[in-house]
């Protein structure tokens, strides 16, 4: 999870009395982990660990404070993605429909509104949005006389401040759910340094109507450090209704090429400025404005955009710890529940009405025609609009699903799907049980493939521990470090692993300690690997730095293609990669 100034709630016991009688009590840390905790100044009483075999009835390898309720940080996404895969299916796709309430005339003039109805697509990137507007133009619409009406009714989420969680509402990881989200509401600046001239040229994505952007920023000396703050970014509102982006600071030349992603506008304004620019490039004209509303019954769909399959979205969610995707997955599960229940209630109502009609005295055809001559032309009743899904709907679906897995819902409480919450809490034992359920799931291959591979990709790319032998989701908050996933031990067994470290004073060595947990599981049944020490950590840091520099150079060579990836990918790598490197 991208960082934040959130202090997680204090840990609290969570195991029920019945469960306590059936399961082993908390065990002390084994010697290798006790030594690692001492070396990295991590308090064992601030650690939770559960290591259990993924199959069979074998005993857990380790349960340490496994029944203490703690904040999971981004490992909450382990729950969200498995829930979504099982409830929605691997090929689930979100549709965004473009509707009109009138037919364009011979010249392509639409004397009405354009309606855009979202279903919660978390990955409707700018390239796809521009392509759909080109398709709309090709369908015969050239000029829109009315408004562009956005239908976000599938999600019913409160309009809360994006600063509410950690005061950093401009960061992409804090974007609120939006059933008609486009391009993650992200504004991306790519800095291309020219050291000879002492400047960095700026490329901006996406193009926006009525927004002025600088073309360069000055380079400065010194370490890269907190380069985002040094930029001094500001978005100004001008008197003529336009905006101007400014960088009042500098970019340290030591940073090299960088991408800066920011949330600088509310959702309707962002949609309108992006739509105007893209529609103009497609050749169209538009006189109206963007507003929110529902698609009327008489409107007809002209085109529709289908998202990537859920498997791809789940992979982006877990490998790069994308919060807005996780929140959309969670709400989509809730929407699926609402729509299922509404359909069942409607069908039951029609069945009851039909049964009631069957009880009435039968009439001859002549009598029926005399009473209602147009009865044969009468249309079947139409199901009324369905209400939007709330977080409570998603939580209700999660609770039922956990019970089906034999897991007490009180032990895994997911507030919004992402882990960015003061209410979310889990226990290590319950999370290990969930991982066992994931291993037994019919969607196990897709689930495992969505997780970062130790030392190879995602948020584990820079952590060279048990390389390729683990599938580990990471979590990162100001006072939480966590891991959850699967590790193959030297003797060929596979283990479900969940571990977390809590408390600000334990954070400097938290990641190194968790890496030792992974190593300890890797070495089960064989001669132990050398523990991570200050010396080995330094060598690992140097190797990581070299590999990171090579990877960054390769990424920069891709240029504008990076916009296809969720903007939070870079954010997550910084917070869960660099920030999670073992510290000396």
Image (cartoon, helix red, strand yellow):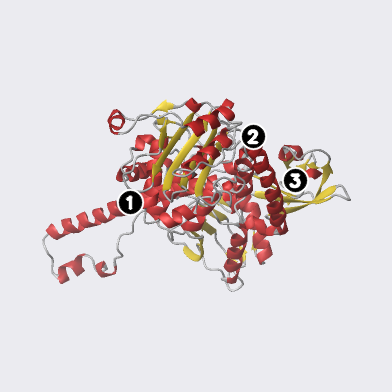
Q: Which residue is mark 2?
A: 534
Q: Residue furthest right?
A: 196
The quarter of the picture where residue 6 lies is top right
Q: Answer yes or no: do the residues labelled 1 and 2 have beta carbons within 8 Å?
A: no
Labels 1, 2: front one: 2
Number of labelled discs? 3
Residue receiving disc 3: 244
Secondary structure at numbered mark 3: strand
Gap between marks 3 and 1 measured at Cα = 46 Å
**In the rendering, which numbered label is found on residue 342?**
1
The foreground one among 448 and 341 is: 448
Q: On the picture, is 537 further left or further right than 247?
A: left
Q: Earlier in the sequence, mark 1 or mark 2?
A: 1
Identify which residue, 190 or 151, lies in the foreground.
190
Identified at 20% across, 59% down, the residue is 354
- Residue pictured at 72% horizontal, 37% vertical: 226
Q: Residue at x 16, y 55 (%)?
A: 356
Q: Classify mark 1: helix, strand or loop.
A: helix
On the picture, is 475 further left or further right than 359?
Answer: right
Q: Residues within 10 Å of mark 3 (few under 14, many from 20)?
A: some
Which is nearer the eye, 273 or 50?
A: 50
Which residue lies at the image location 40% right of the left edge and 39% below the top edge? 61
């Amino acid at each position: 999870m991208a960082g934040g100034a959130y202090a997680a709630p204090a840990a609290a016991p969570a195991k029920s009395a019945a469960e306590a009688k059936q399961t082993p009590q908390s065990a002390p840390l084994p010697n290798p982990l006790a030594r690692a905790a001492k070396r990295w100044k991590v308090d064992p009483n601030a650690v939770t660990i559960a290591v259990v075999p993924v199959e069979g009835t074998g005993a857990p390898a380790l349960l340490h404070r496994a029944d203490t309720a703690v904040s999971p940080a981004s490992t909450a996404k382990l729950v969200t993605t498995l829930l979504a895969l099982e409830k929605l299916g691997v090929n689930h796709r979100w549709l965004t429909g473009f509707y009109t309430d009138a037919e364009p005339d011979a010249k392509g003039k639409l004397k009405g509104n354009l309606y855009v109805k979202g279903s919660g697509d978390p990955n409707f990137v700018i390239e796809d949005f521009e392509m759909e507007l080109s398709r709309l133009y090709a369908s015969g619409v050239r000029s829109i006389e009315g408004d562009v009406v956005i239908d976000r009714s599938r999600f019913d989420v409160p309009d809360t401040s994006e600063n509410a969680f950690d005061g950093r509402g401009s960061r992409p990881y804090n974007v609120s759910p939006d059933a008609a989200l486009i391009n993650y509401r992200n504004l991306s600046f790519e800095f291309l340094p020219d050291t000879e001239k002492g400047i960095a040229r700026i490329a901006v994505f996406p193009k926006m109507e009525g927004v002025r952007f600088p073309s360069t920023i000055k380079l400065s000396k010194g370490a890269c450090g907190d380069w985002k703050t040094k930029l001094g970014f500001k978005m100004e509102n001008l008197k003529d209704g336009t905006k101007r982006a400014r960088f009042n600071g500098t970019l340290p030349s030591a940073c090299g090429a960088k991408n800066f992603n920011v949330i600088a506008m509310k959702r309707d304004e962002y949609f309108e400025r992006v739509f105007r620019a893209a529609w103009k490039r497609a050749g169209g004209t538009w006189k109206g404005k963007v507003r929110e509303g529902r698609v009327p019954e008489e409107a007809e769909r002209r085109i529709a955009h289908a998202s990537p399959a859920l498997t791809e979205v789940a992979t982006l969610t877990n490998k790069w710890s994308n919060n807005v995707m996780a929140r959309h997955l969670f709400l989509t599960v809730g929407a699926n529940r609402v729509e299922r229940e509404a359909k069942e209630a409607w069908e039951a109502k029609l069945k009851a009405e039909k049964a009631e009609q069957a009880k009435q005295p039968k009439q001859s055809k002549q009598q029926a025609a005399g009473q209602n001559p147009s009865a044969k032309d009468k249309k079947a009743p139409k199901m009324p609009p369905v209400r939007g899904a709330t977080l409570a709907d998603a939580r209700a679906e999660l609770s039922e699903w956990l019970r089906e897995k034999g897991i007490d819902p009180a032990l895994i409480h997911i507030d919004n799907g992402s882990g960015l919450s003061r209410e979310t809490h889990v226990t290590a034992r319950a999370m290990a049980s969930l991982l066992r359920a994931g291993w037994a799931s019919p969607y196990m291959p897709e689930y495992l493939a969505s997780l970062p591979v130790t030392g190879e990709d995602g948020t584990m790319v820079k952590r060279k521990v048990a390389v390729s032998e683990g599938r580990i989701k990471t979590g990162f908050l100001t006072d939480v470090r966590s891991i959850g996933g699967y590790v193959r031990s030297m003797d060929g067994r596979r283990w479900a692993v969940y571990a977390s470290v809590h408390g600000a004073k334990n954070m400097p060595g938290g990641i190194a300690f968790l890496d030792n947990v992974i190593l300890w599981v890797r070495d089960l049944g064989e001669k132990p690997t050398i523990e991570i020490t200050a010396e080995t950590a330094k060598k690992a840091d140097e190797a990581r730095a070299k590999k990171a520099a090579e990877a960054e150079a390769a990424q920069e060579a891709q240029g504008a293609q990076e916009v296809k990836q969720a903007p939070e990918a870079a954010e997550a790598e910084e917070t869960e990669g660099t920030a999670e490197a073992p510290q000396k």
